[in-house]
Amino acid sequence: MEMANLGKLKVLILGSGGREHALLKACLKSPKVSEVIVAPGNGGMALEARCLNVDLTKPADILNLVRKQGIEFVIVGPEIPLAHGVVDVLEAAGILTYGPLLAGARLEASKAFSKDFLFRHKIPTASSQTFQKLDAAVEYIRHQSLPIVIKASGLAAGKGVVIATTLAEAEQALRDMMQTKIFGSSGDEVVIEEFMQGEEASIMLMVCGEEYLMLPPSQDHKRVGEGDTGLNTGGMGAYAPTTVVTPEVERRLREEIIVPTLKGLKADGIDYRGTLYVGIMVTSTGPRVVEFNVRFGDPECQVLLPLLETDPVEIMLAIAAGTFRSSNAQLRSGSTIIVVLAAGGYPGDIRKGDEIKLPANCPADVHIIHSGTQRLADGRVVTAGGRVLGVVAHAATLSEAAQKAYRIIPTIQFEGMHYRRDIGYRQLKRNAGK
Ligand code: AMP
Ligand code: GLY
């Protein structure tokens, strides 16, 4: 991908979740990387790389760290630094960076902006209206059918969406967001949307202008309980590929969603380089956009990087440099799964500080990814967040990958640990032809 002239680089990964731990593992394997630093990192990453503290909302602080450490390539994991314009600041300073500029990051940072983008470019999505005034929003929902979807326009860590089945619930959601401001200024504007029926899939694109690589379609499991019951979480597990995206759905996805999105970005003067996550609903009338995110999904990233035959770092470097050609990137066969091990109480008030016992070694193609963990000065690793660990396994088939992942879980222990035993169930059912 014409990056050979760069030699080996000193890389910084921004973020502290499972996604970033997976990116770290990719960097540690990459022949393009001489050294990796993570900021801020977590307990697992601290065992594999140097972790430094930084405020992800402060691009100037990040630039200082980059200069002080002699970093040559920055990979941005989460949306927060992107929404604060970190790529604009680093690129202006001549630092190669993987992730979109602020103009592109708005696709995730403002749902009002992304809905407007979708409508202007005639990309299939739920019909919706945007409101800044509570009274007008309340008046509007009285004339809509149920269920109805209420979304805080700004960033809300995946919690800003309410699917209301009654008018009272919808009105309460509007009051919570616009009056009580439970998501702060992210609720200054709300998007009220038609409910779409269907099965969701996560489409991860590695984008360089109009050139893109579509990673295998994956599915997240957002609810805490088996059979998709209980409260919403950041994601309790994922697998890839999913055949809910049939060849026909994929054709329509590329023609009706991906190509118009990349052309639309260009037409709007946005030079998009980085991951574009298109959340889709596969409906009876075809795929429709649920949302855009401007970074890898977590936990989707953890199952997608192992499905790349080509070095992911090489792809990210070529995208950052604007030289990427998708024909140079190869995917790997087989299936991957991640089962998330969550802290007691998650997704509510969680326990923290419990010691984690890990197996001494893992079989080939099984990895333990850290999310909410912390390494203490005495070397012990303890729980420090809701999603604590993820067990990733790769195999020829999903059912073998699931067996590999679930087999290792009993060797992992921490107080209050819970996980879903049915990750991948929709696909396993499809595979069984039921
Ligand atoms: P978002 O943050 O926009 O992805 O919304 C979070 C979740 O809410 C999605 O992953 C869907 O499960 C659900 N959701 C959002 N919008 C809709 C919609 N219009 N129809 C049905 N479900 C939706
Ligand atoms: N897994 C959903 C997300 O990363 O937003």
Image: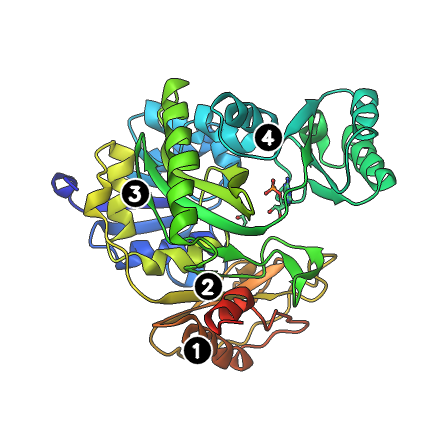
Q: Residue at x 58, y 59 (%)?
A: 221
Q: Is residue 236 left or right of residue 295?
A: right
Between discs 2 and 3, the one toward the N terminus:
3
Residue picked out by circle 2 = 369
Look at the numbered discs 4 and 3 and tell me whether their residues touch, using CB distance below 8 Å. no
Q: Nearer the viewer, residue 396 or 257?
A: 257
Please rate how many residues cluster around mark 1, counting C-alpha atoms within 10 Å: few if below 14, some from 14 to 19, many from 20: many
CA gap, disc 1 to disc 3? 29 Å
Residues at circles 1 and 2 in contact by the CB criterion of under 8 Å: no
CA–CA distance in space, label 1 to label 2: 15 Å
Q: Earlier in the sequence, mark 1 or mark 4?
A: 4
Q: Amino acid at mark 3?
A: Met
Up the image or down, 364 lies above or below 256; here it is below
Mark 4 closeness class: few <14, some 14–19, many ≥20 residues within 10 Å? many
Q: Nearer the viewer, residue 388 or 402?
A: 402
Question: In front of the other: label 1 or label 2?
Answer: 1
User: In the image, which disc is placed on residue 404?
Assistant: 1
Q: Tell me residue 367's x, y (percent).
A: 41, 69
Residue at the image position 46 percent from the left and 55 percent from the top: 218
Q: CA distance from mark 2 to mark 3?
A: 21 Å
Residue 45 position in % (x across, y down):
43, 58
Helix, strand or loop for disc 4? helix
| Tag 4: amino acid | Lys
Q: How is the image coloured?
A: rainbow
Residue 364 position by quadrant: bottom left
The answer to which image quadrant residue 426 occupies is bottom right
Label 3, on which residue? 316
Q: Mark 2 against mark 3, which lies toward the viewer?
A: 3
Q: Count residues near mark 3 (Cα–Cα under 10 Å), then give few for <14, some for 14-19, many for 20+.
A: many
Disc 4 under 8 Å from ligand 1? The reply is yes
Instruction: Mark 4 or mark 3: name the one nearer the start of the chain.
Output: 4
Look at the image and tell me whether residue 370 can be seen: yes
